Amino acid sequence: MQKVTDGRLARGEARRELLLDAAVSIVGEQGLGALTHRAAAAAAAVSLASVTYHYPSADDLRRAAFEHAGSRIGLEFLWLVTRAAEEPDALPDICGDFAARLVTERRIDTIAVFEMILAAGHDPELGPVKRLLELRLARLLTPYVGSDEAAFTVTAALQGLVLTALSPDRACEPGRLRVAVSDLIRRYRATPGGPVPPHVAPPPAGEAPWNPSSPP
């Protein structure tokens, strides 16, 4: 019985992953307005009932897609920043390379996240997810820049640089983005040449942490 239950749970998790991958692709390629239960079912090649079973409302589906895309980006960033703890001088270039990946290999995830960040301005269901994503990303940079305020400033500036690079006339210029982000991180370093605490602050109680044990 246990094996049967485990098998069902594994299949359910795989189905959710498939649905969310499809949902993120829809948002990244067509915009948030195109994400519906029917569109997700068609893109994932599953029944409409399967989508509504996992995500009963449109808000549920949108929120889950936002968390999915944001977590994939955040997990990769967490892995890179954690790796850089022993070599803090490399962090600016690591962040620059990561930003370039966001507008190339991770382009669909990144566009989906920005679509939902904008939607969160008038959608109360998405607001908490947006704030949590920004908090997590800022927390990763706090040891390097020295304060929460500076970390949020850098996070906001990073978002602006990446968003600009996603525009059609900048889509082929990831190199310029890489240089700009590296320069930004260097300018905000708390103590140039000084050590960076080799840790990432733990999440508050009740918040699901990103797992840095392996790359995404």
Image: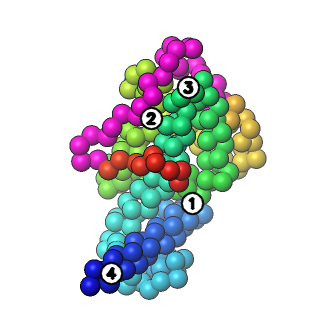
The tag earlier along the polypeptide, 1 or 4, is 4
User: CA–CA distance between discs 2 and 1?
Assistant: 25 Å
Q: Amino acid at mark 3?
A: Pro
Does the stretch in magenta take in 70?
no
As drawn, is 166 to the left or to the right of 143? right
Q: Amino acid at mark 2?
A: Leu
Q: Which residues are magenta?
A: 180-207
Q: What kind of element bears circle 3?
A: helix
Q: Name the mark on residue 194.
A: none
Q: What kind of element bears circle 2?
A: helix
The tag earlier along the polypeptide, 2 or 3, is 3
Question: Observer-nearest residue: 147 or 180?
Answer: 147
Q: Is residue 21 visible?
A: yes
The tag earlier along the polypeptide, 3 or 1, is 1
The tag earlier along the polypeptide, 2 or 1, is 1
Structural crowding at the residue carrying mark 2, measured as other residues with C-alpha within 10 Å and reported as few (<14), some (14–19) or many (≥20): many
Q: Name the mark on residue 140.
A: 2
Disc 4: which residue: 3
Disc 1: which residue: 28
Q: Nearer the viewer, mark 2 or mark 3?
A: 3
Task: Please identify the quarter of the rendering in which residue 9 is found.
Answer: bottom left
Which residue occupies 64% across, 25% down? 183
Disc 3: which residue: 88
Q: Is residue 207 above or below residue 161?
A: below
